[in-house]
Image (spheres, rainbow, N blue to C red):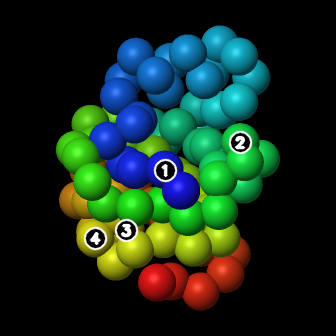
Amino acid sequence: AINVGYFTSKKVQTLVEQGKAVKEGILYVIDLEKLGYEKLLGAGTIAPQLKLVVSRCSARAADKVKAAGGEIVCTGSSA
């Protein structure tokens, strides 16, 4: 599992440079499953606008991502 607070602007930029994230318009798209994470949790704060693909996420994590102007693509069930 990984927390939303992990995704600072600097960390997201590093992921883009490593080819692990892609910028689409104003959103940074990150497939957490490809990074080895199956669940997104809500601890921390999130600044960049992200589109996160993950199999499971907490409601709190989804709310925080959406409040920051991003979106969640949940490929499994929310928990």
> Do labels 3 and 2 touch, CB within 8 Å?
no
Q: Report x, y in % for residue 35.
A: 71, 42
Observer-side mark, 1 or 4, equals 1
Is residue 52 placed above or below 11 in the rendered structure?
A: below
Q: Nearer the viewer, residue 45 or 22?
A: 45
- Residue 73: tell me if it is visible: no
First in residue order: circle 4 vs circle 2 = 2
Q: Nearer the viewer, residue 69 or 57?
A: 57
> Do labels 1 and 2 touch, CB within 8 Å?
yes
Furthest residue to the front? 1
Number of the label disc, if any, that sits on residue 69: none
Observer-side mark, 1 or 3, equals 1
> Do labels 3 and 4 touch, CB within 8 Å?
yes
- Alpha carbons under labels 1 and 4: distance apart: 13 Å
Residue that mark 1 sits on? 2
- Alpha carbons under labels 3 and 2: distance apart: 18 Å
Residue that mark 3 sits on? 62
Q: Residues within 10 Å of mark 3 (few under 14, many from 20)?
A: many
Residue that mark 4 sits on? 60
User: Disc 2 residue type?
Assistant: Leu
> Do labels 1 and 4 touch, CB within 8 Å?
no
- Alpha carbons under labels 1 and 2: distance apart: 10 Å
Q: Report x, y in % for residue 46.
A: 28, 42
Label 1, secondary structure: give it: strand
